[in-house]
Image (cartoon, grey):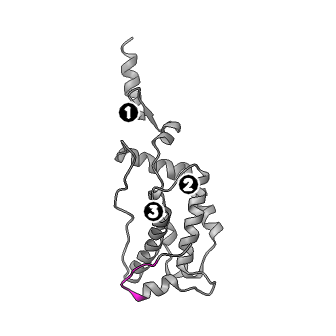
Amino acid sequence: MAVPSVSRTSEKVNTWFYTEWRDNVAPSNTAIYIFYEFTAAIKKKGLALSVHNNRFIHILCEALCTLYDAELQNMEVCGPTKRHEYVKDWNDELEATWIDYLQSRILNEGFWDTFWYNMGTADWEVSLPRWRVWMQSVLPFYIHRDIDLLVQEGLVFEDEDGHILNAEEALDAAEYEESFP
């Protein structure tokens, strides 16, 4: 798969992104590798991307360039702030439950240790030491949200009208129903 062109105002960033280092690996090659490995790993877990594959590759490339640009300027970078088109009835509380679920059960420390170990370390990483930690916080943002999975896992509940309830709301509803024999 071809690496999309990334428009940057800095020629230094462009050169860094496309130049192969001593180990014959450019950051652009790493972005493509992350795409293939990450999508394969989440597919094994029954998950999918929330964006089209080509868009995800572009996001990875832009992320690496943005990180390097920020590193050159000694600036901090924060993660994505734009909300996706979420599934129907998705809200901030479900988002927090989803992220917690991903981080504790799917994309936990063991997942990331294996993921990064299998990738190896490229020479270019010396120029961007914190990029893996940043990617770990950003990549889950692009996994398709799945209410049914949260229901299956018992993290949220669905009432008889099809409304999604968190554990506290479900407990309150159950106690309310028990109070009326």
Q: Main secondary structure of the magenta part?
A: loop
Rendered location of residue 64, percent (x, y): 46, 74
Identify the residue at image location x=38%, y=86%: 10
The residue wearing badge 3 is 138
The residue wearing badge 2 is 108
Identify the residue at image location x=40%, y=83%: 72
Between 155 and 146, the one lying in front of the other is 146
User: Element under label 3?
Assistant: helix
Amino acid type indicated by mark 2: Asn
Depicted 56 relative to depicted 163: above or below? below
Q: Nearer the viewer, mark 1 or mark 3?
A: 1
Instruction: Tell me how far mark 1 sits from mark 2, CA to CA.
Output: 29 Å
Q: Residues within 10 Å of mark 1 (few under 14, many from 20)?
A: few
Amino acid type indicated by mark 1: His
Rendered location of residue 158, percent (x, y): 43, 32
The image quadrant that residue 147 belongs to is: top left
User: Element under label 2?
Assistant: loop
Q: Which residues are magenta?
A: 5-11
Instruction: Tell me how far mark 3 sits from mark 2, CA to CA.
Output: 14 Å
